[in-house]
Image: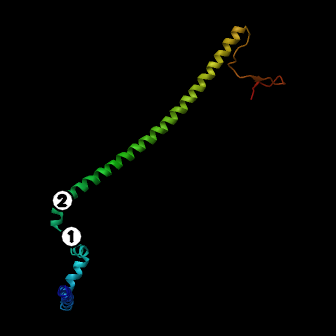
Amino acid sequence: MAKKLQHSQDAASKSVGNTRRRRAALTPEEKKRQRRKALGFWYTFKDGRALSLAFFKRNAWLILLTMVALVWLMSQRYSNQSKMQEIKTLEKELRRAESDELDAKAEYMSLIRENEMRKLMDKAGLDLDYQEKPPYVVAAERDAAPQPAK
């Protein structure tokens, strides 16, 4: 058991020693490569290898699908905006129509009341009549013309 433990410790110390020797023995070019591996994607993107022709060949369907989705989303947004604008104009038109309807109803109700009053006057035998012309104020002077009442 002691031999196995000592043997594993020797192997560990040798591997640590080897890495130290490898680091010390690295040339500037190898150090540069190691740094590039550590930063990985940044260097491939910076060098233009990330967006190479091979990248587009590998991801052509994904790129196409993404473009179709973006165009569809833009068209949906445009159609929604135009429909919202149409809804606003229709709501304004509805408010105007409701206002016109209320005005017509009020006029109709006043005519009905007037007709009802005439019928009641006729039924009661009152000798009252609806005036078509507005009343006039009689002037105290004989030379003055009559003036409409205000």
Q: Element type at marker 1?
A: loop
Between 60 and 35, the residue placed more toward the observer is: 35
Which image quadrant: the C terminus? Answer: top right
Between 100 and 8, the residue placed more toward the observer is: 8
The three-letter code of the residue at mark 1 reads: Ala
* Residue identified by numbered label 2: 60
In the rendered view, does 114 fall on the left or right side of 37?
right
Give the Cα separation between the discs numbered 2 and 1: 14 Å
Between 88 and 140, the residue placed more toward the observer is: 88
Q: How many marks?
A: 2
Q: Residue at x 62, y 19 (%)?
A: 112
**At which x and y percent is residue 27?**
18, 90
Q: Residue at x 18, y 59 (%)?
A: 60
The three-letter code of the residue at mark 2 reads: Ala
Which tag, 2 or 1, sits closer to the chain's start? 1
Cβ–Cβ under 8 Å for marks 2 and 1: no
**At which x and y percent is residue 25?**
18, 91
Q: Residue at x 16, y 62 (%)?
A: 58
Between 24 and 79, the residue placed more toward the observer is: 24
**In the figure, 85 relative to 13: above or below?**
above
Which image quadrant: the N terminus? Answer: bottom left
* Residue identified by numbered label 1: 50
Q: Element type at marker 2?
A: helix
**At which x and y percent is residue 131?**
70, 18
